[in-house]
Image (cartoon, helix red, strand yellow):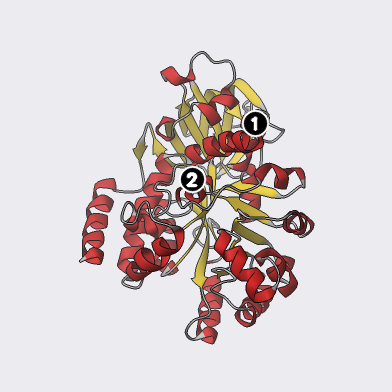
Amino acid sequence: MNILIKNASVLTMSSEAELMDNTNIAIENGRIKSIGQVPEEFKADKIIDGTNKLAMPGLVNSHTHIAMSLFRNYADDLPFWPWLTERIMPLEEKLIPEHVYWGSMLSIVEMIKSGVTSFADMYFFMDDVAKAVEEAGIRASLSIGMSESGDQEAKIRNAKEYFDNWHGKADGRITVMAGPHAPYSCGPSFLSKVIDMATEKGMGIHIHLSESKREIEDSYNLRGKSPIKHVKDLGLFELHTLAAHCVHLSDEDIDILAEKKVNVANNPGSNLKLGNGFARVEDMLKKGVNVALGTDGSASNNNLNMFEEINLAALVNKALKGDTTSIPAATAVRMATLNGAKALGIDKEVGTLEAGKKADIIMIDLNKPHFYPRYNLVASLAYSAQASDVETVLVDGKVLMENYELKTIDIEKVMFNVERCAKSLIK
């Protein structure tokens, strides 16, 4: 379907925070054909009125565990390690594929409704996550979460098979990375096996790094170096790497991340809620590290609201640095769009609105009191916008939500099945 978005304000993100007023976007065969003047030969099958709306690149949630929506509000206000080992992991042991499918669908509903068009996920029963992605029409980078416990060779085989079965599927919307959980759950020998496998298959790596103070202390006690230095010495950073959290970093760590072009997924909401602190975002950006934004899972956030993460990224850095110019609004928005696309390795296709790129576009309803007066729309996205302002969402040029109504998912069916699955888990 050829789609014409007419008379919208357009934030392209292709050059800083370029904003165009009262313009048009022509979409053909799932890609942006033009922005501005509509080519004479273009014939629209569908016209979307952009009056009083802002069209911008879809948001990228660069680190999450979407099936953990099943654990939302189940284990709150606990220290990180008891939260993880005493409450979350015991429930995870009871998960079955059906649970993961419905938990994933619930999170995809939440993400589409809040303007997320791409996400990076690491978890279990990932075939069922991929099925949910394929059915819903969203874009995703998916990783089987791996630890060294159990049959390591079987885990490596499963990761290879998952890549072969799903990478490039769903019309190219699904990409696959390797997902070693973290250095504290994957010893050097197993990490080396994962690195060899990923190198052989041409896979990137999605891993948790330097999330908590205890993780840093344990790493120095065990190996005499930080988790960042440890995995660098193993050769992990020779591959495209998406490193989640990176909260507790030394200057040397930041230099390593910059040198090896590691992509960092900053998760301000989760890091704050679990008491893990806040990453040195400005220091990383100044060194040239690509820093994106993620929500983490709904058990530690407890939502998938990327506008909330944009807001936190802009505000908390100012307080930490004592500098009101730290992480300006445009930078925070870029972290959630183009930087996220780079982190997932898909920035040649999405992350900005440009002719030739995939039409992953969200439209914000500006006819809300908190958008007035309209001095600076980019600033309003970081400091005023709400997830509920997202009115229309397109991925690959397909309408997933229009006028707040989802087109590919039965919300009532999803919520019914999630409640059923959650009760069976707790029981």
Residue 242 in the image: above or below residue 165:
above
Q: Residues within 10 Å of mark 1 (few under 14, many from 20)?
A: some
| Residue highlighted by disc 2 | 269
Q: Is residue 160 left or right of residue 260?
A: left
Query: Where is the C terminus found, in terms of image quarters?
Result: bottom left
Near-viewer residue (391 or 188) = 188
The numbered disc on residue 222 is none
Which amino acid, mark 1?
A: Pro
Q: Secondary structure at mark 1?
A: loop
Report the Cα–Cα distance between label 2 and label 1: 18 Å
Residue 65, above or below 113 = below
| Residue 240 screen position, x and y as percent | 69, 62
Residue to which mark 1 is pinned: 328
Q: CB of mark 2 within 8 Å of CB of mark 1? A: no
Give x and y (percent) for residue 281: 65, 45
The kind of residue tagged 2 is Gly
Drawn side of residue 394 relative to residue 317, left or right: left
364 in relation to 121, above or below:
above
Residue 12 seen from this side: no
- The reply to whether residue 198 is visible in this rendering is yes
Residue that sits furthest to the top in the current view: 373
Can you say whether 91 is above or below 2 in the image? below
Give the left or right position of residue 366, taking residue 74 as reference. Answer: right
Q: What residue is shown at x 39% (from left), y 48% (from top)?
A: 302
Alpha-carbon neighbours of circle 2 within 10 Å: few (<14), some, or many (≥20)? many
